[in-house]
Amino acid sequence: MNDSQPENHPTIVQVAVPRPLRTTFSYTLPAGDAAPPIGCRVRAPFGASTIVGIVVGLETNVAGIKLKEISEVLDEEPVLGADLIDLARWSAEYYHHPIGDVLATMLPTLARRGEDAVVRAKPIWRVKRGDLNVLARAPRQQETYTLLSALGAVRDAELAVYGLERRHVRALAEKDLAYTTEEQPNLRRGHTNITTTLEQRVAIEQIVGALGKPETVLLDGVTGSGKTEVYLRAIEEVIDRGQQALVLVPEISLTPQTASRFLTRFGSAGTYHSAAADRDRFDTWLECAKGVQRILVGTRSAVFAPFKNLGIIIVDEEHDSSFKQAEGFRYSARDLAVKRGFDLSIPVVLGSATPAIETLTNVDRGRYRRARLTHRPGDAALPRFEIVDIRGLHLDRGLSEPVTSAIERHLESGSQVLVFINRRGYAPVLFCPQCRWQARCANCDSRMTVHQRPRQLRCHLCDAVGSIPVECPDCRNELINLGAGTQRIEEALGERFNVPLYRIDRDTTRSTARLEANLNAIREGEPLILIGTQMLAKGHHLPAVTLVVVIDADQGFLSADYRAPERTAQLITQVAGRAGRAERAGEVWVQTLDPENENLTALMADGYAGFAAREASHRRDARMPPFGFMALIRADALDPEGPRRFLAELRSSPATAGVAIAGPVPAPIPRRANRYRFQLMVTAEKRADLHRFLRSIEVIESPRNVRFSIDVDPLDTY
Ligand code: ADP
Ligand code: ZN
Ligand code: ZN
């Protein structure tokens, strides 16, 4: 316990309640009870109900008004240590979000519900030596055996994380080739036959040299340059010093390889992500707090996990937008990781092949240090770019002839091809060439996407579905599909090429197991075509792919959102990075209607770094983040007048010195799921001015039917 008891016995506790309220509430303690330390949970009456809140303060003097009494103190020791309570307070102020809701977001669901903070023993699977011949006819079980024995020990709850299926593991147990135990695996010092490159050693030294210091290091390394190996070595050192490591990743369920590399190297690693069961999340969280779990690999919310002795935080793919929560408490896990590292005086490593403009700017300003990995180990060459100008070319369902010929050439030489199109479905527009009618969503300002199997229209914004009309509802003319999505590309390529096709998008790939099975087949290296959305751009190693085709990605360069060019350049670079990861150099063909686009040509000529420098100078000229500070205030309701009027009222706040306010204007998607959306964009050259304005409006209550939110450092303006 860090909190020293005040001299007089406190009799009043301040509690943050899990409600969107900006105040904390005072309660008295049951007579004779000692005050619980700050960070403990209490059950207390609130209105007509009972809540589980967090003690955030203690007082000795009795207030004039009569207070309600705590019903129950749930913890003897704080579930949230002083560092996390401080982080919550800071976050509530920075993001202008109610402290009670911030604390509730930090806690795992079961902790929030008041469940006992006691870890339950959990079965852990291991393989047993035995006669593997019995698996001769069970290839999936054989695969499972190999994977499980490579991983060492996998908790039952985490099988899916590593792409293992419980039924196959159980089948192994029946054959006496696997067993469960409740014993925690010992942490082992990593063993590997990888010899680090000079660049890797320099990076490792820089990070290890920062241990115990509040330093942020950008690990700026091209895709496949061995960033993960650098993390592993740095963590090894942290573990040797008896400390813990937190690794934040954008996605666990889609990239099991990332988590499995930590597990195979160290023999023990916890995972924390939204797909895990509540009980497992709470257990892992508690194990980190007790120091039992030394390595935690988790998604966004893991930035709030408690640790006994944290030594390093690593944010892999730091540019990824999933680190920012898009609703409720709109925090950036990457930015809070940096803040947390600073508070704890430990290094934070931000790794990416395509660092965010704000991160690069922080390097330029001398706030972050940088380590570079400029090439791939073993001299795997970086891909070569080719721009295909499709103006005036005939397209067969989105594909031009030069691109199709290139695909043919690569398949014939025995390699794999990846076709990237960031649009799922069959066609984005169903159109009448006679009267220009388009299929639109009844609930949103958007078009319906045509889907096949099942044949239907779907709105990607609100998930509404409808049947495909046989003729134009207005003029009875025949309708045509415009543009192409993954399904249509799949159809076109399937007719032309006689190789296996794998389509990987949100419609085909709901489960990790399915994706893993596909990826395993893909890693066999047979000629085939992969068609996918950005799901494929994330972290997968596809060593046999020698050609990446990018369709329509340049559309992002034309979007009105000021961050769209950055996101697009990152996406193209990340997809391109899947090519030529092994010995064979890759080619990236970008099919575009806008070959002279300056963003695109900068990216092709000078790579992501060249693009980023250019983009940063535009932002500087426009005083856009990170050269100015921004918040977006959004309001929506079932009618347009309410949100518009409410935002106009916010705008008339007296505290507008130093801020520029644009709006109220309709959001770029003005109506979504039947709600009319408006926004105010607030920018300031000084952060203090922005926050003064936000403080002045955060307390204003919106009319009952108008929803409103404050988004500080918004990632998109939609
Ligand atoms: P990144 O995270 O930068 O994309 P990875 O860490 O995944 O790159 O490394 C890409 C591949 O290169 C992996 O298969 C990894 O095992 C391998 N690798 C990393 N460092 C080395 C090295 N020094 N020598 C040989 N192979 C390496
Ligand atoms: Zn028509
Ligand atoms: Zn819709």
Image (spheres, rainbow, N blue to C red):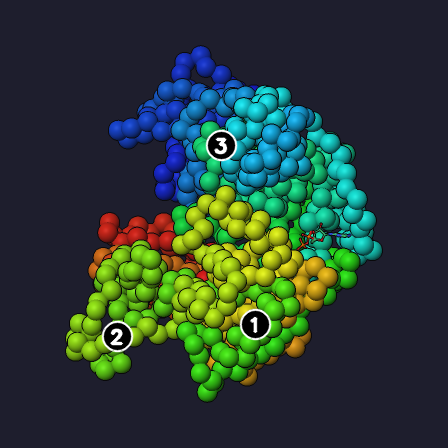
Q: Secondary structure at mark 2?
A: loop
Relative to residue 604, is residue 197 depicted above or below? Answer: above
Q: How many marks?
A: 3
Between circles 1 and 2, the one closer to the viewer is 1
Q: Is mark 2 within 8 Å of ligand 2?
A: yes
Q: Please, what is the three-letter code of the amino acid marked with disc 1? A: Glu
Which residue sits at x=66%, y=27%? 131
For label 3, the crowd category at 10 Å Cα-Cα, with few meaning under 14, some 14 to 19 and many 20 or more, is few
Is tag 1's residue or tag 2's residue first in the polypeptide sequence? 1
- Verify CB contact (< 8 Å) between mark 1 and mark 2: no
- Tell which of 444 and 267 is nearer to you: 267
Mark 3, residue position = 167
Between circles 3 and 2, the one closer to the viewer is 3
Which residue sits at x=57%, y=39%? 139
Is tag 3's residue or tag 2's residue first in the polypeptide sequence? 3
Relative to residue 92, is residue 32 depicted above or below? Answer: above
Q: Please, what is the three-letter code of the amino acid marked with disc 3? A: Arg
Relative to residue 203, is residue 546 depicted above or below? Answer: below
Q: Specify the quadrant that holds the C terminus.
A: bottom left
Which residue sits at x=37%, y=20%? 71
Residue 511 left/right relative to 379: left
Mark 2, residue position = 479
For label 1, the crowd category at 10 Å Cα-Cα, with few meaning under 14, some 14 to 19 and many 20 or more, is some
**Residue extending furthest toward the bottom:** 392
Residue 558 in sight from this viewpoint? yes
Residue 205 left/right relative to 675: right
Quarter holding residue 292: top right
Q: Please, what is the three-letter code of the amino acid marked with disc 2? A: Leu
